[in-house]
Image: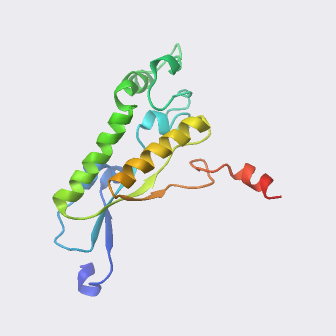
């Protein structure tokens, strides 16, 4: 119906489940050369959401990226099955290879649909991820997106998912 009113502007469409890959794949194949499919990227979730209470990760912190068995934190002695699964599965999803495969599937989707894809959100919860680990994650993610010619938007610059330390920048600029 949008095209009955506006034939010129691009339309960005995203799928269910927080713009997940499966949600994007479930979208119809629009016969429109001005459609951009969007997705959000916060993988590996165990790394990007460590310490986040709303993700039930408040007791999981100190997660390295990429996965390094020697640097993995101990599970709480009373770990829930969900916490145990997140830590145990991290060896599979917390690798550069796993992150690369995520972006390869988005690039393949773009080729199959002959339409651009756009990473409308990506980021890492800053309070509990070590700075050098976050910088490494952002560097790898941006490189992989760039190599696949996928445009992107970081979730935020100065907030809890920020790539900059706002307080330090403000102090520096005084």
Q: Can residue 55 be seen in this view?
A: no
Task: Classify 49 as above or below 81.
Answer: below
Write down the quadrant of residue 114 in the picture: bottom left
Residue lying furthest bottom = 5
Q: Position of residue 63 (x, y in %)?
A: 51, 28
Q: Where is residue 104 in the image (x, y as percent from the top left)?
A: 27, 46
Residue lying furthest top = 77
Q: Where is residue 153 in the image (x, y as percent from the top left)?
A: 46, 59
Residue at coordinates 38% horizontally, 31% vertically from top-left?
95
Residue at coordinates 49% horizontally, 55% vertically from top-left?
154
Looking at the rendering, in which quadrant would you find the N terminus? Answer: bottom left
State the count of labels: 0
Residue at coordinates 30% horizontally, 66% vertically from top-left?
36
Residue lying furthest right = 174
Q: Which of 139 and 71 is in front in this view?
A: 139
Residue at coordinates 20% horizontally, 74% vertically from top-left?
32
Looking at the rendering, in which quadrant would you find the C terminus? Answer: bottom right
Task: Say left or right for 53 vs 26.
Answer: right
Task: Say left or right for 133 vs 30.
Answer: right
- Name the colouring of the figure: rainbow
Write down the quadrant of residue 10 in the picture: bottom left
Q: Where is residue 3 in the image (x, y as percent from the top left)?
A: 24, 81
Q: Is residue 150 visible?
A: yes
């Amino acid at each position: 119906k949008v095209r009955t009113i506006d034939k010129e502007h691009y339309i960005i469409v995203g799928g269910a489940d927080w713009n997940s890959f499966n949600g994007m794949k479930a979208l119809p194949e629009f016969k429109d050369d001005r459609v951009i499919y969007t997705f959000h990227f916060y993988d590996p979730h165990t790394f990007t959401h460590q310490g986040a209470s709303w993700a039930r990760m408040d007791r999981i912190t100190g997660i390295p990226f990429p996965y390094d068995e020697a640097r993995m934190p101990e599970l709480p002695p009373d770990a829930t099955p969900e916490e145990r699964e997140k830590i145990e599965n991290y060896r599979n999803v917390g690798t550069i290879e796993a992150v690369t495969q995520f972006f390869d599937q988005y690039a393949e989707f773009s080729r199959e649909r002959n339409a651009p894809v756009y990473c409308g959100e990506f980021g890492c919860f800053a309070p509990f991820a070590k700075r050098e680990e976050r910088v490494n994650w952002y560097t790898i993610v941006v490189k992989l997106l760039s190599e696949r010619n996928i445009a992107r938007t970081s979730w935020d610059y100065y907030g809890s998912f920020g790539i900059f330390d706002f307080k330090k920048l403000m102090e520096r600029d005084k």
